Image: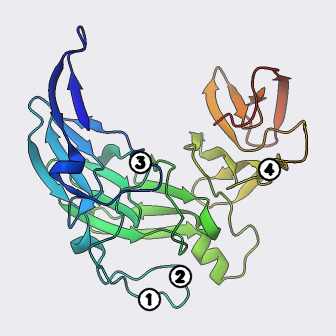
């Protein structure tokens, strides 16, 4: 249920039962994408069939303004990175929503919305819902999800997923917004048999961009866990710290996969094991300033 509440009183102004009003195919973990406001519209990843993956609601009334993304978007799209790269045959029962929140920004002087759906990345016009382009980006296993938000820098966009080797990519958007040039991707690296194929494969957090580089914790499940710094435009791995741990192996002095916040030239790092630390923001080498393992923080700190 999508709610609009009065900020001072909490009284409902309007609400929409999206499950009732749209044909929503249930996802693994419910609704995880946050709505975003843009010029009086609430852009929401509803994830409904047949073509209501993203819906814009009037922020004042809750009325539907436009809906798009679904079968018309993805049918007959090549499944990039899958064995043989078959074409998508849309059946009308597919899950469409992901757990990634849309990112609305300005590219080449125009407002655009980047929506990392379950099937991949879509760039659309937030005012009309028109799709400028799409790029298939999902693992072949049915239990895979996309959860990390796109990271947009100037006319480039970064996406990542941790599931089954999907990895990451950076696309450079064409000036007319009609498409993109792929600067680098795990898919391309695998085709070229290059090392560090999965430079970043992130489960939930959105990587932090700083001065041309991405900082994040890569890894899907225990014992995965690698704190990494990666050059944004090239995907070059600048440094990494192994923070992997075995969930059932007893107490360890490791972060595991972490969530980061950047403040005052430092990263506040909270590991899934409950380890809390400070790192210096440095692209040349990892510098841990201090850490503390509180007895009240324990797995899973996500």
Res 177 → quadrant: bottom left
Residue nearest the observer in this picture, 172 or 18: 18
Quarter that holds the N terminus: top left
Up-down relation of residue 186 to residue 48 (above or below): below
Q: Which of marks 3 and 4 is nearer the N terminus?
A: 3
Look at the numbered disc 1 and give the secondary structure of its residue. Answer: loop
Task: For marks 1 and 4, give the CA distance.
Answer: 35 Å
Task: For marks 3 and 2, give the CA distance.
Answer: 26 Å
Look at the numbered disc 3 and give the secondary structure of its residue. Answer: loop
Residue 58 left/right relative to 96: left
Quarter that holds the C terminus: top right
Residue under numbered circle 1? 86
**x and y, in percent, of residue 64 in the image:** 10, 46
Residue under numbered circle 4? 240
Q: Looking at the image, can residue 126 be seen? A: no
Q: Which label was assigned to residue 30?
A: 3
Residue 289 left/right relative to 297: right
Which mark's residue is nearer the viewer, 4 or 2?
Answer: 2
Which mark's residue is nearer the viewer, 1 or 4?
Answer: 1
Task: For marks 2 and 1, give the CA distance.
Answer: 7 Å
Q: Earlier in the sequence, mark 1 or mark 4?
A: 1
Identify which residue is drawn at 43% across, 62% down.
172
């Amino acid at each position: 249920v999508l709610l609009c509440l009065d900020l001072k009183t909490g009284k409902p102004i309007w609400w929409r039962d999206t499950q009732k009003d749209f044909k929503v195919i249930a996802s693994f973990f419910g609704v995880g994408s946050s709505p975003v406001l843009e010029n009086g519209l609430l852009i929401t990843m509803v994830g409904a069939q047949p073509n209501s993956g993203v819906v814009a609601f009037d922020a004042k009334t809750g009325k539907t303004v436009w809906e798009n993304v679904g079968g018309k978007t993805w049918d007959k799209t090549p499944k990039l990175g899958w064995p043989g790269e078959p074409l998508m045959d849309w059946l009308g029962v597919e899950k469409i929503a992901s757990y990634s929140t849309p990112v609305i920004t300005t590219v080449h002087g125009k407002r655009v919305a980047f929506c990392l759906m379950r099937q991949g990345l879509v760039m659309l016009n937030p005012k009309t819902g028109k799709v400028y382009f799409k790029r298939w980006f999902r693992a072949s296993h049915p239990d895979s999800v996309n959860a990390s938000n796109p990271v947009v820098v100037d006319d480039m966009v970064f996406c990542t997923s941790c599931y089954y080797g999907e990895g990451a990519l950076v696309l450079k958007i064409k000036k007319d917004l009609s498409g993109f040039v792929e600067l680098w991707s795990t898919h391309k690296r695998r085709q070229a048999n290059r090392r560090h194929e999965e430079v970043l494969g992130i489960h939930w957090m959105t990587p932090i961009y700083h001065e041309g580089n991405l900082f994040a914790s890569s890894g899907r499940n225990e014992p995965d866990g690698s704190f990494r710094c990666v050059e944004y435009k090239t995907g070059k791995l600048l440094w990494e710290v192994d923070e992997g741990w075995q969930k059932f192996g007893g107490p360890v002095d490791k972060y595991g996969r972490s969530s980061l916040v950047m403040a005052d030239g430092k990263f506040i790092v909270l590991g899934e094991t409950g380890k809390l630390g400070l790192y210096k923001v440095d692209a040349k080498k990892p510098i841990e300033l201090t850490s503390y393992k509180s007895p009240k923080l324990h797995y899973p700190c996500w």
